[in-house]
Amino acid sequence: MAEKRCYYEVLGISRTATEVEITKAYRSLAKQYHPDRNVGDDEAKAKYAEVDEAYSVLNDESKRARYDRHGHAGVQGGAAPGGGGVDLGDIFGGLGDLIEGMFGGRRGGGARGPRRGESIQAVLDLELLEAATGVSKTFTVPSEQICRECGGTGAKTGTQPAQCRRCRGQKFEVVNTGFGFAERVRCRGCSGRGVVITDPCPACRGAGRVEAREQVTVNVPPGVDTGMRFTYPAAGHAGDPGAPRGDLELVIRVREDKTFERDGHNLICQCPISFARAALGGPVELTALTGEKVTVDVPKGAQSHTAVVRVPGHGMPNLDDPKRKGDLLVQLVVETPTKLSAEQEQLFRKLAELEGTTVPAPRKGMFSRLKDLVTGDGDQKES
């Protein structure tokens, strides 16, 4: 059996697509592959079923959340025979209203139950050290919550919303889209609420919701990396009265460190060493990311920028098993001394003599050479 395609790929939408974008993509594809337009075309029939299945999952808040976290396995099982497929009752039952509306049909009530709140996406910035050790972070998340004064009705205390005359409380209306098709859309008279507010609540001005800023504390495990996502249930926007809140989805972003560079589970850093240490080898002490002192054994004859020493267990922890850590890769950089004492200069000259190297006389600096070119002194000396 062929492997199922990603539902977002089937509908041609991004993972951040809104409910409106999902429905729009579905309607376009459903019209394109509908069996009534493709009589005898088995490929179109299969694609139509694939589109139906994708829409049934992505248009349902809870199913979409499970699919985002666990893939196809998160929405399998249920009423499908054998327990291996998607619940067919959910697929065709959930699409009934929309399909019938597209082809001129209509169901009894037409109104959906209270909708779950939308999720909130936020970026959490971390330092590399925080990503390595884990951290508890408290920050403010703006969200929409049910107005406490009116309980989400939007009506002033002591009053009740009135039924929408346009849709008669059904929340949807049937419109003609051309080519003999009709579809149900959210009522324009009440924005899909089924009621209109004649005397609005002064706290929320009839919206039934107010802006809130909540303090959220999250515990980030050690080993996280940029792009990782964590979901915190019921920390998002409020749903309709009686429906659960959405989730908070945190996207991790780890800032670059001035000293250490991350490469998967490994860390890379540079360690300056002297000419003598590079030639003779020996131990050099440096400080790891966590502040721990680490001794690096420099090999004899180490070459600048090409010699790399591996220190096991001083890299980034594994997210699944924090006790397992990557390595610290230390690139050795030989530093040329800029100032020498008389004794050091004497020793370097002695070394040069032993190597058979002739020490040249001091050269003119750049500004001296430029002066010679301007005054012509250089040409006179040559002549």
Image (spheres, rainbow, N blue to C red):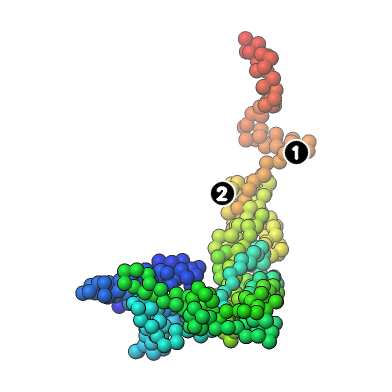
At label 2, counting other C-alpha atoms closer than 10 Å, the crowd grade (few under 14, some 14-19, many 20 or more) is: few
Image height of 144 relative to 345, above or below: below
Q: In which quarter of the image is the N terminus?
A: bottom left
Q: Distance between the residues labelled 1 and 2?
A: 25 Å
User: Residue at the location (69% across, 57% down)?
Assistant: 286
User: Residue at the location (56% across, 68% down)?
Assistant: 228
At which x and y percent is residue 360? 66, 27
User: Residue at the location (66% across, 54% down)?
Assistant: 258
Q: Which mark is residue 180?
A: none
Q: Left or right of 136: which side holds 75?
A: left
- Disc 1 target residue: 339
At label 1, counting other C-alpha atoms closer than 10 Å, the crowd grade (few under 14, some 14-19, many 20 or more) is: few
Query: Which amino acid type corresponds to the residue marked 1 in the rendered image?
Result: Lys
Give residue 80's quadrant in the image.
bottom left
The residue nearer to you, when weighing 113 against 319, is 113
- The reply to whether residue 231 is in sight is no
Q: Quadrant of the C terminus?
A: top right
Image height of 383 relative to 97, above or below: above
Q: In the structure shown, which secondary structural element does the residue marked by tag 2 occupy?
A: loop
Query: Which amino acid type corresponds to the residue marked 2 in the rendered image?
Result: Thr
Q: Residue 306 carries which label?
A: 2
The residue nearer to you, when weighing 5 against 205, is 205
At which x and y percent is residue 206? 64, 76
At which x and y percent is residue 91? 39, 82
The residue nearer to you, when weighing 87 against 320, is 87
At which x and y percent is residue 38? 25, 72
Mark 1 and mark 2 residues within 8 Å of each other at the beta carbon = no
Give residue 13's quadrant in the image.
bottom left
Give residue 106's quadrant in the image.
bottom left
N-terminal of the pair, mark 1 or mark 2, is: 2
